[in-house]
Amino acid sequence: MRNNTVGATTLVEPPQVQRDDLGLGSRRARAWAWTGGLSVALLLTVMGGVGLGAVWVAPSDVVGVIGHHLIGWPGERGWTDSTDSIVWKVRLPRVLLACLVGAGLAVCGVALQAMVRNLLADPYLLGVNSGASSGAAAAILFGIGAGFGEHALQVSAFLGALAASVLVFLVARSAGRVTSVRLLLAGVAVGYALYAATSFLIFASGSAEGARSVMFWLLGSLGLAQWNTPLAVVAVVVLSTAALLTLWGRRLDALAIGDETAHTLGISPERFRMLLLVVVALCIGVVVSASGSIGFVGLVVPHLARRLVGATHVRVVPVAALIGAVLLVWADVIARTLLQPQEIPIGIITSLVGAPFLLLLIRRLHATAA
């Protein structure tokens, strides 16, 4: 692995350029094996996540309730009405939202690390999280977006994320063509500015309860999960993003190696980066508007996926989606059971896991560069 230094920013070339000792067939077989294993793990994780909580629900009852609502499971009901409500109305939507949010953050992290050619990049990089946070703070503290009714928070957060994405693009574009360095610097600058704007909104509101709600939302929460339109929208956007990024796997490989390689293969790096920016910003905006800001998933999971199946993006994207889904479900289980009946913001759990990983990654990159 080698470092390319542009100005004051060090871009770490990802391991796409490193050859694997395994043959092509072996790598594919390993990727299929991990994909299948993680799919089974995700199914078991969903069952476990629905069953665990302040009230324990047996796996047989979990399967029975879900089967009854989905396909009219035949036979007598062996569970109570309260168990039915807990499983179907409360926990299952929350677990499914955790799966979607974890998968969305993970695949966006994969795309961003290829787009800016930096292994330390994550969805916070583009300032989209900060934009969503500003929009949510405006909705909670000042009632902006009240015309959208019960979905005012999600809509305001998404509009804030969209505005942040446009601003990042305009800043990166103002100096000429869009490059990885300009996107990186523009995202950092816009993110800091919007974080300051959110802090100002909290200070200006003078509402202690409102400030507490904003701070809890800023650290991430899946408490908004319900069987309604937002969950369906998150599902459509995340699954579409994962499918697109998988189809664009070879383009991502070329972009991660360098602009010269992309040009050689007939890919316009600038146009592809703009397209990626739109897709990633849309996905992050929708995800953050439903769950708040959840850190480190988009940073940690892509590295785990590459360790398992190599660096080819066609294999990395689906594996990263599965790992992200499993990771966030268990993080949510810990968040809502560790100090029950109180709920810990899920961002605290992911940060406790991600921060040591980041330190190890920085140490590894420093040792490689030396």
Image (cartoon, helix red, strand yellow):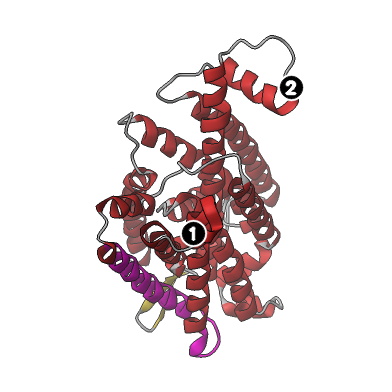
Magenta stretch prevailing secondary structure: helix
- The image position of residue 70, as x and y in percent, is 71, 28
* Quadrant position of residue 181: bottom left
Disc 2 residue type? Answer: Gly
Q: Is residue 122 left or right of residue 359?
A: right
The foreground one among 54 and 89 is 89
Quarter placement of the C terminus? bottom left
- The image position of residue 7, as x and y in percent, is 38, 84
- Residue at 49 percent of width and 89 percent of height: 174
- Residue at 36 percent of width and 67 percent of height: 369
Magenta stretch: give its range: 173-202
- Secondary structure under badge 2? loop
* Mark 2 or 1, nearer chain start: 2
- Secondary structure under badge 1? helix
Disc 1 residue type? Answer: Ala
Q: Which mark is residue 72?
A: 2
In the displayed structure, would residue 269 be above or below residue 100?
below
Q: Which mark is residue 183?
A: none
Task: Give the residue pinned by disc 1.
Answer: 146
In the displayed structure, would residue 74 be above or below residue 114?
above
* Quadrant position of residue 196: bottom left
Q: Please report contact status of discs 2 and 1: CB closer than 8 Å, yes or no.
A: no
Q: Is residue 159 magenta?
A: no
| Residue 122 is at least partly visible in this image | no
- The image position of residue 30, as x and y in percent, is 63, 42
